[in-house]
């Protein structure tokens, strides 16, 4: 599911100091190359890959992706090696491996009808996990399993059950990793700002430590970090980037031995600053300003924490209850996606398949219902139109020397027109009126 990114250790104009520092830490952790980051994107279906394959995700961005993520449930249905979930998962891992990427499987360990933490810890799922791990090992590539993320949150069926979670994680780690060096376990709590999130009897000092299964069972540590503007400030405050990874000393406590992943992150502003209970949502333009601030804050977090190995964006539009102790706006459709053009500005592009900004070969620009591309290279593989959130809204693999594109069905706005060849991707920014 979800969006993830990759950096290249080269002479880019951005993040140079970060990359120099990261080079040392990546080598100390035994990484096989000097890259980190990747792809974490919801358009990849959890059942099949018919909507967007890893390769299409790779080709739809100027950033080369390293990590690709899927979710599964720990129950007899999803772990059935002949069932649809595992069949799809095999295709997914094959596709990621073909891109020299790393699959990350996020495992939800509790299904109210089929599995509990105690069943996992007492060995009831050992044979299923053994069969599952044996299947994964056959791919002969590193596979990261994030077991029960956000276990410190009450919103998870496995949440705030500290001792039961520790035992289940330990059992899963022992079974899944046994004699399988390519299978890694990631421990990923939620950022503890606001812990215990309306629960009682829990102390802030244990927001992370109470759930940690122990060094013997962990290969990666991580956090899920979201910033939701409940305070209606319409901005990302300085304390967010100053404290998120350092809150309760998480970074210094847990990343000394293990590389760190932010496996989910996003910023969303529910409402304009207002008084009373009336919700006034931000316009698309205002949301983009807010999300740009959020991305810049994430960039600062990365620069200040060189042991952070990867950051993953929760790149989805989904319905979610928008409420906290002071607000209840009901079940809203929330757009967690990040502005594509801002991401491309902040992140270095894939050097092996460079994006070349050229003088427009398109006209008219701005354009109305039709756009014409001229003087196209002979070896064009595909032409794409991509909106500012990185979604490919039009593509064609049939290319003539002159190509006409009908924009009448697309909303007005700014699009990146990509002309993809084996050697490079050319980008032309198009304004559709």
Image: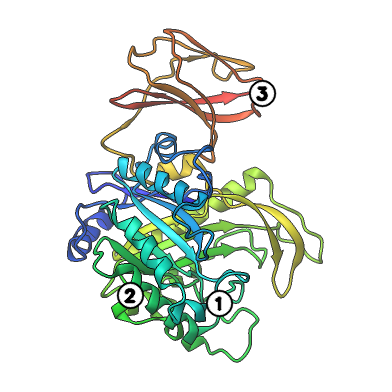
Circle 1 packing at 10 Å, graded few (<14), some (14-19), many (20+), is some
Question: Which of the two discs, 2 and 3, labels the residue nearer the N terminus?
Answer: 2
* SS of the residue under disc 2: helix
Q: Nearer the viewer, mark 3 or mark 1?
A: 1
Estimate the x, y position of residue 363 in percent, counting from the top left. Answer: 52, 13
Q: Nearer the viewer, mark 2 or mark 3?
A: 2
Q: Are marks 2 and 3 in contact (CB under 8 Å)?
A: no
Estimate the x, y position of residue 409 in percent, counting from the top left. Answer: 66, 23
Is residue 305 something one can see in this rendering?
A: no
**CA distance for labels 3 and 1:** 45 Å
- Quadrant of residue 284 within the rendered picture: top right
Question: Which of the two discs, 1 and 2, labels the residue nearer the N terminus?
Answer: 1
In-front residue for pair 139/419: 139
From the image, tell me which residue sits under label 2: 174
From the image, tell me which residue sits under label 3: 409
Q: Nearer the viewer, mark 1 or mark 2?
A: 2
Residue drawn at the location 46% of the way across and 59% of the way down = 297
Q: Are marks 1 and 2 in contact (CB under 8 Å)?
A: no
Mark number for residue 159? Answer: 1
- Quadrant of residue 112 within the rendered picture: bottom right
Residue drawn at the location 71% of the way across and 75% of the way down = 325
Mark number for residue 37? Answer: none
Q: In which quadrant will I find the C terminus? A: top right
Question: Which of the two discs, 3 and 1, labels the residue nearer the N terminus?
Answer: 1
* SS of the residue under disc 1: loop
* SS of the residue under disc 3: loop
Estimate the x, y position of residue 117 in percent, counting from the top left. Answer: 51, 78
């Amino acid at each position: 599911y979800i969006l993830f990114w990759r950096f290249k250790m080269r002479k880019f104009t951005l993040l140079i100091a970060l990359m120099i520092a990261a080079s040392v830490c990546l080598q100390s952790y035994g990484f096989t190359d000097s890259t980190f980051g990747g792809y974490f994107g919801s358009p990849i279906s959890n059942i099949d890959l018919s909507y967007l394959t890893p390769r299409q995700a790779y080709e739809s961005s100027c950033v080369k992706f390293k990590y690709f993520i899927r979710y599964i449930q720990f129950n007899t249905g999803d772990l059935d090696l002949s069932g649809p979930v595992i069949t799809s998962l095999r295709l997914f891992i094959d596709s990621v491996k073909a891109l020299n990427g790393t699959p990350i499987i996020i495992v939800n360990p509790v299904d109210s009808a089929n599995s509990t933490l105690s069943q996992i810890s007492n060995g009831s799922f050992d044979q299923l996990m053994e069969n599952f791990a044996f299947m994964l090992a056959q791919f002969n590539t590193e596979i990261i399993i994030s077991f029960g993320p956000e276990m410190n949150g009450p919103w998870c069926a496995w949440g705030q059950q500290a001792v039961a979670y520790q035992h289940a994680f330990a059992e899963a780690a022992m079974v899944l990793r046994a004699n399988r060096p390519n299978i890694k376990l990631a421990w990923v709590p939620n950022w503890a700002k606001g812990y215990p999130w309306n629960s009682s009897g829990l102390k802030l000092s244990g927001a992370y430590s109470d759930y940690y299964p122990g060094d013997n069972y962990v290969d990666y540590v991580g956090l899920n970090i979201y910033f939701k503007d409940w305070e209606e400030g319409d901005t990302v405050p300085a304390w967010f980037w100053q404290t998120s990874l350092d809150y309760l000393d998480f970074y210094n406590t847990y990343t000394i031995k293990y590389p760190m992943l932010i496996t989910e992150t996003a910023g969303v502003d529910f409402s304009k600053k207002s008084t009373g209970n009336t919700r006034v949502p931000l316009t698309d333009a205002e949301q983009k300003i807010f999300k740009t601030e959020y991305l810049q804050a994430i960039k600062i977090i990365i620069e200040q924490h060189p042991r952070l190995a990867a950051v993953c964006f929760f790149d989805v539009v989904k319905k979610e209850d928008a409420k906290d102790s002071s607000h209840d706006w009901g079940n809203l459709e929330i757009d967690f996606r990040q502005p594509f053009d801002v991401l491309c500005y902040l992140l270095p592009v894939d050097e092996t398949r460079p994006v070349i900004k050229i003088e427009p070969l398109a006209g008219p620009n701005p354009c109305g219902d039709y756009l014409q591309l001229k003087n196209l290279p002979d070896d064009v593989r595909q032409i794409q139109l991509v909106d500012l959130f990185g979604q490919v809204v039009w593509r064609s693999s049939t290319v003539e020397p002159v190509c006409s594109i009908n924009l009448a069905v697309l909303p007005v706005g700014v699009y990146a027109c990509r002309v993809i060849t084996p050697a490079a991707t050319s980008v032309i920014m198009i304004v559709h009126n």
